[in-house]
Image (cartoon, rainbow, N blue to C red):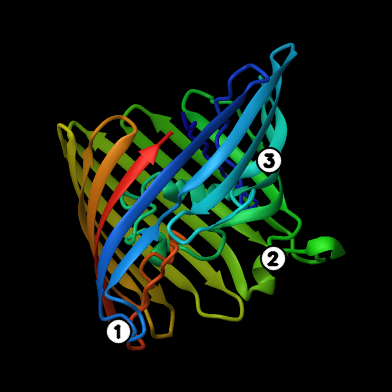
Amino acid sequence: MKKSLIALAVAGVVSAPAFAATANVDVYGVMNAAVSYVDDQPAAINDIQFSTFGSRIGFKGAEDLGGGMKAIWQIESGVNFEEQSGSLSGRNSFVGLSGGFGTALIGNHDTPLKSVGRAVDLFGDTIGDSRNVMGGGSDLRAKNVVAYITPDMGGFGITAAYSTDLGVSGAAGDADNRGVYNVSATYKNGPLFLGLGYGDGDGHEAAGLGAHMRGAAGFTMGALKFVGQYDKLDGDNSADYDAWMAGVAYTMGAITLKGNYMDGDFDGAGADPQQFNIGADYAMSKRTKLYAVYTDGENVVLGGGAGSSDQIPSGVAGGDVSGLSLGMVHTF
């Protein structure tokens, strides 16, 4: 069964994973596929798209070292099974130590800032993923990362991480003046989630960016769940960018109805993105669900934020693009 990991740092990591205290290897994964009908796309793109979203297979384990300490590891690979392609260890993959002191990792992983946003995205890993508008900057899976995650402190946790080079350096070694650091803090107590993330460094400057700040919140009240997010990404050689998201979900039995709206603004520049989603999930079991999503956006690439196997831009510069997606997710 998949174990949830929460990362907090521009170099990528997650909240301390719950690994089995054995040397056994656990196999886990997600299979997420959908068929979508898209409109207002470029003429060369088919109206019907078969796509995968965030599908992966992973292997992880732990060895008890005594004294409450464990050696932990994980290798996670992306799988675009309808395209017959994937990436070996291209997702969160690392080795580290875990104990009463917290967790320390080295490898590649989602940045903490990214994980703060993942916690409140009602349409994550679908055609309407919030990263279509709320992505960029430190919202990524970082390479060349060392990270530290505190143990849970009454629902409060901090993660800090540093990446020597977010890019692919190859055999030449990590590039100079490309370091990026992140720190994030989260608080989870019953129905309440609060998260803050911050990232900056030479790697941002090399990309023409400044500091990236993110705040997110979620609150569950009975069958209702409310979520919100705000991002501020300073430009260095580009315009400053501000974006916000608000959403609500209502669960009745096995069915969850949901919707959200996102709006971004480039200071003093055009091509501002916006997007709204409405959808429904149907839980067939704890591990299998069906879903339907309708999304409509302007200046966005549908599925781009989720790293979909098929990413759909508008057929007209600055134009509208929409899609209706029916999918299935199975977690193992």
* Amino acid tagged 2: Gly
Instruction: Tell me the tag on residue 226.
Output: none
The residue tagged 1 is: 319
Q: Secondary structure at mark 1?
A: loop
Q: Secondary structure at mark 2?
A: helix
Q: Position of residue 191 (x, y in %)?
A: 31, 31
The residue tagged 2 is: 203
Judged by depth in the image, the label closer to the viewer, 2 or 1, is 1
Closer to us: 75 or 221 = 75
Closer to us: 217 or 15 = 15
Q: Residues within 10 Å of mark 3 (few under 14, many from 20)?
A: many
The residue tagged 3 is: 94
N-term-proximal mark, 2 vs 3:
3
Q: Determine the image quadrant of residue 204.
A: bottom right
Q: Secondary structure at mark 3?
A: strand
Residue 132, relative to residue 126: is it above or below? below
Q: Residues within 10 Å of mark 1 (few under 14, many from 20)?
A: some
Q: Position of residue 40 (x, y in %)?
A: 26, 81
Q: Residues within 10 Å of mark 2 (few under 14, many from 20)?
A: many
Residue at the (67%, 33%) spot, across then down? 73
Residue at the (46%, 28%) spot, across then down? 1
Judged by depth in the image, the label closer to the viewer, 2 or 3, is 3
State left or right for residue 153 relative to residue 121: right
Alpha-carbon span between mark 2 and mark 1: 31 Å
Res 22 seen here: yes
* Amino acid tagged 3: Phe
N-term-proximal mark, 1 vs 3:
3
Residue at the (33%, 85%) spot, across then down? 315
* Amino acid tagged 1: Gly
